[in-house]
Amino acid sequence: MKISGAIFDVDDTLTISEWVWKGIPEKFLKRHGKVAEPGLDETLALLNTAQIGEYFKEHYFQDSHRSAKSIIWEFGTMGAPYYFFKVPLKPGAKKLVKQLYKQGVKMTILSANETTLIKAALLRTGIHRYFDSIFCGKDAENAKDNPRSFEKALERLGTPKEETLVFDDSLYAIRTARSAGFQCVAVVDGTEPPEVRAELEELSLFCVSDFTDLLDQLEGPAK
C-alpha cells in the first residue's frame, strides 16, 4: 500500500508503556489518603487523559481545591522517570519509521500524554527526528475522541486523507479516526478482550503487534 502521511500514537503504539501507568492511580490515591475503588484500571482504560483528571476530581476530590489538571500533572511527574530512562520501543517501530521517512512519508505524533514525556521517550529511542510535529493532550482539540484532533494533524502534514494512515492501540481512537474518514493500523499486544480485538480488526486495514510485519506492506511516495 502506498501512503504519503502517517499519524502515530506513542503509548503502546510506538512504545511499550502501559506498564508504567498500571499502578500509578493507586499510588497517587494512597499518597493522598484515598483508597482506589475495585476495577479502577479497567474504568480508566476507557477514558482519555482529560477525562481521567475529571474522573478523579469527581470521585475522589469533589470537596477539595485540587483541580483535574493538577491531578493529571501529578500523574505525569510520577511517570516521568520511566519515559526519560526506561520506556522501550515496540518491536520493529524504529525500522518502520525510518523506512517511511526515507521514502518521503510525512509523519506526526498525536498523543493524549504530556508533551515533555513524549519528547523524552522519542529522543532517547532515537526516532524524534523523523516526525514533523507533535500534538499532545493538554489541548482539548488533541483529545482522540474528537475527530478534529485527526483533522488538525492532517492539516499539519498536508497530505491527502486517503493516503494518510492512523496508527493507534486504543479502540476509541480508532473509532474516532474511522468516523473522520481515515484508514487505520491497530497495534495490539494480545491482552485485549476478544470483543475489543475483533472490533479493532474490523475497523483497521492492518492489525499488528510487531511493526516488522508492515515493512513490506507500506511504501512511501519516494519509493
Image (tube, rainbow, N blue to C red):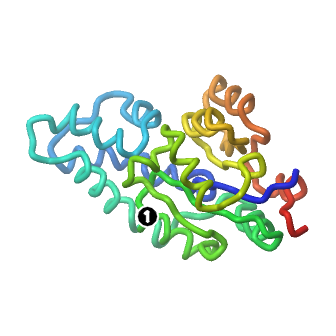
215 versus 34 height, above or below: below
Which x, y percent locates residue 8?
63, 55
Give 207 or 83, whichever is nearer the viewer: 207
Give 12 or 206, whichever is nearer the viewer: 206
The residue sitting at 79% across, 39% down in the picture is 205
Which x, y percent locates residue 220?
84, 62
Which x, y percent locates residue 1?
88, 50
Quadrant in the picture for residue 107: bottom right
27 versus 179 height, above or below: below
Q: Is residue 37 left or right of residue 219?
A: left
The residue sitting at 41% across, 59% down in the picture is 114
Which x, y percent locates residue 176?
57, 36
Q: Is residue 222 left or right of residue 198?
A: right
The residue sitting at 67% across, 39% down in the picture is 190
Secondary structure type for disc 1: helix
Circle 1: residue type: Thr
| Residue beneath disc 1 | 115
